[in-house]
Image (spheres, rainbow, N blue to C red):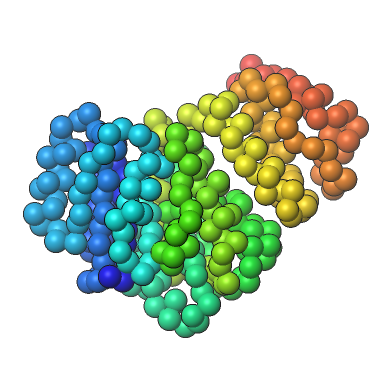
Amino acid sequence: MKLSVIIPIFNTGPTLERCVKSVAMQGIDNMEIIVIDDGSTDPQCNLLCKQLCLTIPQMIYQRQNHAGLSAARNHGLEIATGTYVTFIDSDDYLEPGTFAAVLPLFDKDSKIDLVEFSYIDKEGHDKLSRTVCFQDLEYEGFRDYWLKGKAYRHAYMWNKIFKRWLFDKVRFPVAKNFEDVAVLPDIVKQCQKVLTTHLGFYHYTWNKNGITANASVTDLSFLLKTNIEILKETSDKEYYKSILNIQLDAYGLGNKQLELPIMPYYGTIKLYVLHLLGLKNLCKLILFYHKVIKTLR
């Protein structure tokens, strides 16, 4: 088997057919489409999946008790047989020809273990939607890709194709949101080379009821701690600035525990204020600023 495509679903009947068909029409014959139903309560999901199995021979459909996105992905990894593996959220879809364009890139160099392709982020949102197009670049090792390539800004599983062996000892943390950020560094650390390409396109659809739109203080605290652990290995100013914003967001949602260490980075007003007032006062200042802006609107 060439490629395993893992699609977790939970009550996503309205978008599921578009998602699965966009994969089935990729022009890849040697492919399995693994749909894992995470205990959907909507009977239409089960019915639709059974109907799709009748018309899409590559589709494998299995159900599990509700345990979350990570558990469904892990379930898919347990039964995947492809040399390569990728993940798709059931709200989303692929541009035709994406896999046919991206997969051959692995054949150019046996050291390429991961290929990342372009995407539309939050498609359907009037203000937040953006198109992210990558240049054709090659990175060697974790630091090169994570820092020079600023991979932490697009640490998603869904716009990447991986060699499946990378997951031999890696699984997604169950019952955690922002699980991609927890897993991707462990995957990249195993890669000899990572490729980004302008070829292909993933449509990440905005969902007002989704995890990103409704991140809780617990979610952001987990995201913050995960990034701080990575920061300990990297010590990079741009990365630090990104993590500082997560700390500010977590504080704004009610997490008063300050996790981020103060490091000797300057260059922006926010960093200067951090050193002048301290982290707690910076958090209070930003929170006050947002309250004022909200009042004026």
> Which residue is nearer to you in this view: 291 or 275?
275
Residue 163 sits in quarter = bottom left
Task: Give the answer, above or below, for where 122 lies relative to 274.
Answer: below
Q: Position of residue 38 (x, y in %)?
A: 29, 38
At a point 67% along the width and 19% down the height, the residue shown is 291
| Rendered view: 222 above or below 85 | above
Q: Nearer the viewer, residue 43 or 21?
A: 43
The quarter holding residue 277 reads: top right
Q: Residue 46 at x, y = what percent?
A: 16, 39
Q: Position of residue 221 (x, y in %)?
A: 61, 31
| Left or right placement of residue 238 versus residue 151 in this view | right
Q: Is residue 71 visible?
A: yes
Residue 293 visible, this angle: no
Check the image and report above or below for 269 versus 235.
above
Total number of numbered discs in the rendering: 0
Q: Residue at x 48, y 62 (%)?
A: 166
Which quarter of the figure has residue 253? top right
The structure residue drawn at horizontal position 72% and vertical position 38%, both measured from the top left corner, is 244
Residue at the far top: name it.
295
* Image point (13%, 53%), residue name: 53
**Quarter in which the C terminus is drawn:** top right
In the image, 289 versus 86, the foreground residue is 86
Question: In this view, which residue lies farthest toward the bottom?
Answer: 108
Q: Is residue 179 left or right of residue 61?
A: right
